């Protein structure tokens, strides 16, 4: 379980000396070296912030977290000011409250006041603080900057007019993802956050992961919406519209409807989307099982025939674009398998279309993904195995929730219904795809049994689970030691990839997910998405796995039938045509 701030600080207290400080007239002891903000939160005192975000370096730029420190002439930014022995702090004096309110008004004076038109209406931190501090008018009138909205990216929309220059997106991109696609440009009132040389985001090294959207406190960053296009398809009587839902959606779609993070809503979710008007509601988990069969056999072939190792998984489109920009020399190490989203689309527009007698040009495949990079992936030129785009539109969890609300559907009130057959049948191995380590665990369950012909006694590979940035394990398969690694978040991926690039890697198989926590922490998930919420979603993913009668991908009867009736052999000619792809080296500018 994720530790609370109090527990984390208590752990620090065991390792360092304590200092005595006074907070709002109350004497307390806290570990030496923590900031005023940490000390106050440890004592249950919430100090408002905008530029601060847990897990990122503190900056102190917004000045919303200011406090009064006795003997100090100016107010101190609590997020960057360490405590010291004897310090006396006042967190809500008249001077502090007036300063915070004034700083908010100054931010709002150069901010659009059309909250009802903003994607973040109701979940905007600036809006919430303005309400809390009673800001009902803007006293400061002056020049306002007006910028063009950047819609060049297939995944992320950038609206500089709503940006408050908190820098959380910049630090997330630099410190967590190590992509550095955006940074501060210009100075003073002309300061703006922008890609290098003022290029549009779509022409930068942005990998479309959307972690900047989760970090943004306002509506300056949001996903490129496919909602209207999906509505148009649903309402077109000439179109046969089918839906696929990713493994991570079932443990997060309930949050916008008031359910606790980690609530498993599979049956209710199916019922809700059916009422939205889709002709069929299927499960991307089916294609996750298919991915394991293809990727597992690809790994076995490389292992036996001396192919390029380590084999690196290819399910995360953000990681794939990151590789194409920063590690193109490792392209041959990456599995040629398409992601489950794309495999599903290829199978739907060939195998399933033939079964139904539907012309693939009249079939529209929509996905609901926790990921903004999926929007980029489905538009890649190579993703058209049937002669048509494998997947037509990709919705984030947030977009899907908005569509349900627009239709007047309350997820909580839905009955439990099953996915449609045959592309709705899946195993527990597919479910764990949604968490970091899940692809590796699912692959090991099948690879072990395929290679040995023996039944795996213990299906749970705990060594590849959890939120450690890089996880390692060694698995004995028929006397052969297979070394595997799992990395989530591109900063952690870079550590593993640098070893591979330098020739110092001992690994045979590597899983990489672009987003912290894996898909459960994707850039398209409900806001907020923090460590505690990620942990609850992960536990729910494993709960789904434990609850299913089949927990190994190669035991999925619908997958067996797909190979018997249509694909032939795993990694065969037809499978390669439909389910595999290639990659493109990309420049960094």
Image (spheres, rainbow, N blue to C red):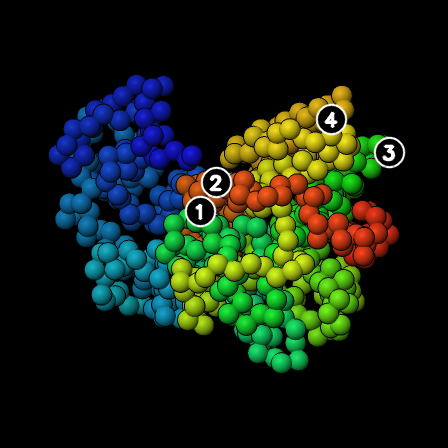
Q: Which mark is residue 539?
A: 2
Q: Nearer the viewer, residue 53 or 464?
A: 464
| Pointer 2 with pointer 3, Cβ within 8 A | no
Q: Are marks 3 and 1 in contact (CB under 8 Å)?
A: no
The residues bearing labels 3 and 1 have C-alpha atoms spaced at a distance of 42 Å
The residue under label 3 is: 305
**Of callouts 3 and 1, which one flags the residue occurring earlier in the amino acid sequence?**
1
Structural distance between the alpha carbons of marks 1 and 4: 34 Å
Q: Nearer the viewer, residue 240 or 502?
A: 240
| Residue 394 visible (yes or no) | no
**Residue 422, percent across and down?**
67, 58
* Figure quadrant of residue 326: top right
Tell me if residue 393 comes above or below residue 454 in the rendering: below
The residue that disc 4 covers is 477
* x and y percentages locating residue 462 in the rendered image: 56, 30
Image quadrant occupied by the N terminus = top left
Residue 550 is left or right of residue 56, and the answer is right
Q: Which mark is residue 262?
A: 1
* Residue located 16% across and 48% down the image: 95
Query: For mark 2, does the 10 Å Cα neighbourhood hold few (<14), some (14 to 19), or many (20 or more) residues?
Result: some
């Amino acid at each position: 379980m994720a530790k609370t701030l109090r527990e984390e600080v208590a752990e620090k207290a065991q390792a360092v000396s304590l200092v005595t400080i006074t907070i709002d007239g109350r004497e307390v002891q806290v570990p030496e070296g923590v900031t005023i903000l940490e000390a106050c939160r440890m004592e249950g005192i919430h100090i408002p912030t905008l530029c601060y975000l847990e897990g990122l370096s503190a900056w102190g730029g917004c000045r919303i977290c200011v406090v009064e420190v006795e003997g100090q002439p100016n107010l101190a930014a609590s997020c960057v000011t360490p405590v010291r022995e004897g310090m006396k702090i006042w967190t809500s004096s008249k001077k502090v409250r007036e300063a915070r309110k004034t700083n908010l008004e100054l931010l709002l004076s150069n901010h659009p006041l059309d909250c009802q038109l903003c994607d973040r209406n109701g979940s905007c931190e600036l809006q919430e603080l303005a309400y809390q501090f009673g800001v009902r008018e803007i006293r400061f009138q002056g020049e306002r900057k007006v910028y063009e909205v950047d819609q060049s990216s297939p995944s992320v929309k950038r609206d500089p007019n709503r940006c408050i220059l908190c820098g959380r997106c910049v630090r997330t991109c630099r410190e967590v993802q190590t992509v550095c696609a955006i940074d501060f440009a210009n100075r003073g009132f002309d300061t703006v956050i922008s890609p290098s040389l003022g290029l549009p985001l779509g022409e930068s090294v942005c990998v479309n992961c959307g972690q900047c959207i989760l970090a943004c406190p306002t509506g300056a960053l949001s996903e490129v919406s496919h909602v209207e296009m999906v509505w148009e398809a649903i309402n077109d009587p000439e179109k046969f519209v089918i839906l696929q839902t990713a493994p991570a959606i079932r443990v997060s779609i309930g949050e916008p409807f008031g359910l606790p993070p980690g609530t498993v809503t599979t049956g209710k979710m199916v019922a809700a989307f059916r009422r939205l008007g889709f002709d069929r509601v299927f499960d991307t988990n089916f294609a996750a099982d298919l991915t394991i069969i293809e990727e597992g056999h690809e790994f076995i072939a490389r292992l036996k025939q001396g192919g390029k190792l380590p084999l690196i998984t290819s399910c995360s489109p953000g990681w794939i674009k990151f590789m194409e920009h920063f590690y193109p020399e490792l392209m041959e190490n990456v599995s040629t398998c398409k992601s489950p989203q794309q495999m599903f689309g290829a199978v739907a527009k060939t195998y399933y279309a033939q079964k139904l007698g539907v012309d693939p040009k009249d079939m529209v495949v929509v996905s609901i993904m926790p990921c903004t990079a999926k929007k980029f992936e489905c538009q890649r030129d190579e993703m058209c195995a049937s002669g048509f785009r494998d997947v037509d539109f990709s919705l984030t969890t947030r977009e899907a929730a908005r569509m349900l609300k627009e239709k007047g559907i309350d997820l909580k009130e839905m009955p439990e219904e099953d996915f449609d057959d045959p592309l709705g049948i899946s195993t527990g191995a597919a479910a764990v795809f949604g968490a970091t380590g899940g692809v590796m665990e699912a692959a090991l369950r099948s690879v072990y049994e395929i290679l040995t012909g023996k039944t795996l006694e213990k299906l749970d590979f705990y060594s590849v689970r959890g939120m450690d940035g890089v996880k390692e394990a060694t698995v004995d398969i028929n006397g052969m030691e297979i070394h595997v690694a799992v990395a989530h978040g591109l900063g952690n991926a870079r550590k593993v990839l640098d070893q591979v690039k330098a020739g110092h890697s001992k690994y045979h198989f590597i899983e990489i997910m672009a987003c912290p926590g894996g898909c459960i922490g994707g850039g398209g998930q409900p806001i907020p998405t923090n460590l505690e919420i990620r942990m609850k979603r992960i536990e729910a993913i494993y709960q789904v796995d434990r609850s299913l009668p089949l927990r190994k991908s190669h035991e999925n009867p619908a997958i067996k039938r797909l190979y018997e009736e249509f694909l032939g052999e795993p990694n065969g000619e037809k499978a390669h045509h439909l389910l595999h792809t290639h990659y493109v080296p990309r420049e960094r500018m």
